[in-house]
Amino acid sequence: MLASRSLTGWILTLGPIVTFVGFLGFVFPALGGSTPDGSTEFIKLMGENADIIEFGSLIGTFGLCLHAAGIALLNSQMRDGSGSQIMLAGTIIYVMGTAGYIMESALFSNAAEWGASEGFLDGIMFYNLAQAIGSWATFFTLIGFSIVGLAILIQKNFNMILAYAFIVIGLAGAIIAIIDYSSDLMIIGYLGNAILLVVTGILTIRSKE
């Protein structure tokens, strides 16, 4: 059975991988690389690939849940340190944001189903709802992410560069999400979050119990 620290590290590492497999391996190719714009043509395209989109979204969202699980396990590893209370606050906000991602994916998949049945107006409505919830979910998730970075900075259980990266990427991504969720700049938050979680996971695995 994996030790608690190793389990934390593996979940932090595997979460982003599973997320990218779901969204980049299934959803993005199913959309033909087109930019999501909520148009009738886009909803029609979603409908033509509804099953793939639903399957990919399910996998990708499960990966996002692993992100949150990893953060929660990291919180338990830091519970007796000087940054424990701040870490707990960041974890709660991160997990609440992740719940929003589940809603976003469900609505996005529902939009694809409406597209498959040629209910384009309903599909557009569900797509727009998904975008609205996704924007707020991303904002709160990345704010939680930056607070986790602050906790790491205070507790000094990882390299300080990693802590500052958590804070900067979290804040930058949160600001972009709330200003323009459809912006290409969202890659800063998505990719930055994934890379930093993987790095944290690897460092956790390599650290001694």
Image (tube, rainbow, N blue to C red):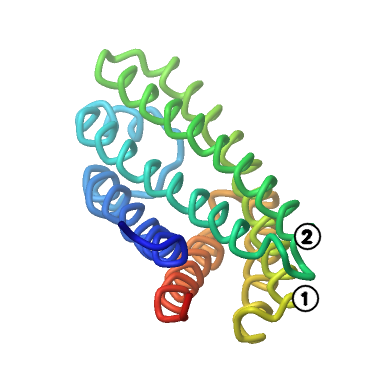
* Residue at position x 49%, y 56% in the image: 70
Numbered circle sitting on residue 154: 1
- Please say if the residues under marks 2 and 1 sit with CB atoms less than 8 Å apart: yes
**Residue 75: quarter of image:** bottom right
* Residue at position x 64%, y 60% in the image: 145
Task: Say which amino acid is labelled 1.
Answer: Ile
* Residue at position x 29%, y 54% in the image: 24
Q: Mark 2, residues whose alpha carbon is within 10 Å: few (<14), some, or many (≥20)?
A: many
Count of labels shown?
2
Residue to which mark 2 is pinned: 86
Mark 2 or mark 1: name the one nearer the start of the chain: 2
**Residue 194 at what x, y percent from top left?**
45, 65
Left/right of residue 208 with respect to residue 74 in the rendered view? left
**Residue 40: quarter of image:** top left
Task: Say which amino acid is labelled 2.
Answer: Ile
Numbered circle sitting on residue 174: none
Left/right of residue 13 with respect to residue 28 in the rendered view? right
| Secondary structure of residue under mark 1 | helix
